Image (cartoon, rainbow, N blue to C red):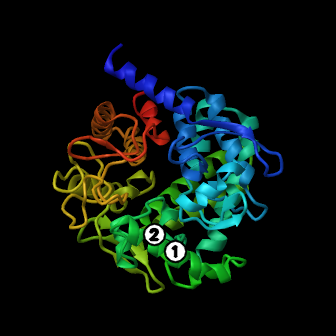
């Protein structure tokens, strides 16, 4: 068995061994999903499940559909879908002890994660052409995007806000140090406890939370995924026969891209900056988020050229031996290893590489970059194993073992 075959087998084994099945005490609902890590993260996480579904397309499209169907059991009447579903009651106490979470219900959190769901549904439909599945999941997916617009865009600028660091999935990323010092696990936990306590009196009215301006952050990565998701939903709505809905989604996607250009684009530096606070200050910390609008099909090619030539391929910033580091290598806050026990402050993650790769691979002008990124990611996983994240210089695997979304490598080599 050659090295490629070994990686494929390891990825398939992770997807199988991380599967959680049972009947929850939450209304006697059956659950069947892939958790991020059986040892570290035994619950269902929103964007993890979306990534797992995409990886599962290379194993069993039926299981990819099941991943999304299980996740959507937590969709609420107003459209909200939580970032974390605590299916197994016996593990709840450990979850509350191990994670800084805010519960909206005994079985799910009150917070969100990046809306990768639409991209996952798009990929499943693109692969299977299963119209019955599409009609089953599309309304709840669209409703979630409607919820984001209704509750997380208080200034109506088509950029959605997150109200705490983990809602982006980037927990302790150094760009958030501009509001809270998250440079260690202890400091991150302190900040999260403060946010949890501050939001408690206002949880019954989610619209009030961004207006509190405690952690009001318009994240470029989150909004790029949001705009990309709206574009996916436009296509899916047309396929489902929802032409009026499709037209609205197209407009909203373009408005989000326009706002990213108007408010976040730095022409001089050639990057996008997150915005924070009511006055929308630019967070000028160079992280992979600054180049993440590369995933947007309708972003002007001249902007993409600058993001690639001046930053992605810059060996002093992001084009390290095993890209793409979560923080640019020339940033003072860059930490390539896990010595600070705090994540998203330097190491590379397969899900980020996957997003950039899948955007570049279909562009004839940029296919060679996509191929090189896929090759380096494959080598990184070969050296470091199926780990949570990797040292961008050595490919040493760090964090949780047998990590779910690292199996996206299956899609990158298919």
- Where is residue 170? Give x, y as percent: 43, 60
Q: Is residue 73 visible?
A: yes
Q: Is residue 227 above or below residue 117?
A: below
Q: Residues within 10 Å of mark 1 (few under 14, many from 20)?
A: some
Residue underneath mark 2: 189
- Where is residue 228? Give x, y as percent: 51, 54
Q: CA distance from mark 1 to mark 2?
A: 6 Å
Q: Secondary structure at mark 1?
A: helix
Q: Does the CB distance between marks 1 and 2 fall below 8 Å?
A: yes
- Where is residue 353? Give x, y as percent: 37, 45
Q: Is residue 36 above or below residue 167?
A: above
Q: Residue at x 64, y 57 (%)?
A: 93
Answer with the quarter of the image where residue 143 lies.
bottom right
* Quarter of the rendering occupied by the C terminus: top left
Depth check: 374 or 1 in front? 1
Left or right: residue 4 compared with residue 321: right
Answer with the quarter of the image where residue 9 lies.
top left
Q: Residue at x 59, y 35 (%)?
A: 126
- Where is residue 369? Give x, y as percent: 28, 40
Q: Residue at x 48, y 85 (%)?
A: 278
Residue underneath mark 1: 193
């Amino acid at each position: 068995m050659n090295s490629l075959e070994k990686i494929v087998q390891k990825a398939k084994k992770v997807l199988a061994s991380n599967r959680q099945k049972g009947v929850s005490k939450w209304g006697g609902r059956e659950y069947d999903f892939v958790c991020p890590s059986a040892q570290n993260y035994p619950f269902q996480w929103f964007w993890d499940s979306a990534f797992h579904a995409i990886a599962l397309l290379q194993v069993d499209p039926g299981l990819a559909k099941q991943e999304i169907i299980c996740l959507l059991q937590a969709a609420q009447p107003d459209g909200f879908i939580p970032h974390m579903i605590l299916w197994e009651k016996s593990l709840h106490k450990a979850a509350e002890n191990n994670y800084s979470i805010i519960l909206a219900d005994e079985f799910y959190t009150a917070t969100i994660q990046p809306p990768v769901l639409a991209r996952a549904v798009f990929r499943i439909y693109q692969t299977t052409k299963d119209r019955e599945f599409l009609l089953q999941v599309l309304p709840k997916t669209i409703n979630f995007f409607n919820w984001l617009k209704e509750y997380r865009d208080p200034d109506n600028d088509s950029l959605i806000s997150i109200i705490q660091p983990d809602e982006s999935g980037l927990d302790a990323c150094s760009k958030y140090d501009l509001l809270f010092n998250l440079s260690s696990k202890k400091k991150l936990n302190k900040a999260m406890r403060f946010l949890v306590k501050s939001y408690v009196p206002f949880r019954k009215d989610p619209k009030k939370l961004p207006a509190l301006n405690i952690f009001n952050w318009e994240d470029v990565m989150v909004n790029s995924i949001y705009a990309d998701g709206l574009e996916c939903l436009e296509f899916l709505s047309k396929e489902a026969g929802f032409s009026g809905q499709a037209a609205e989604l197209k407009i909203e996607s373009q408005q989000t891209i326009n706002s990213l250009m108007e408010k976040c684009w730095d022409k001089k530096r050639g990057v996008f900056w997150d915005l924070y606070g009511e006055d929308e200050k630019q967070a000028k910390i160079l992280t992979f988020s600054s180049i993440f609008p590369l995933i947007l099909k309708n972003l002007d090619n001249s902007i993409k050229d600058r993001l690639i030539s001046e930053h992605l391929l810059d060996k002093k910033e992001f084009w390290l031996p095993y890209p793409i580091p979560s923080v640019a290598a020339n940033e003072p806050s860059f930490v390539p290893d896990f010595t600070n026990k705090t994540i998203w402050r330097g190491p590379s993650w397969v899900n980020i590489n996957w997003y950039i790769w899948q955007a570049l691979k279909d562009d004839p002008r940029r296919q060679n970059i996509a191929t090189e990124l896929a090759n380096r990611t494959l080598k990184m996983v070969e050296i470091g194993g199926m780990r949570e994240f990797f040292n961008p210089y050595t490919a040493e695997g760090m964090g949780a073992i047998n990590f779910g979304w690292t199996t996206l490598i299956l899609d990158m080599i298919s």
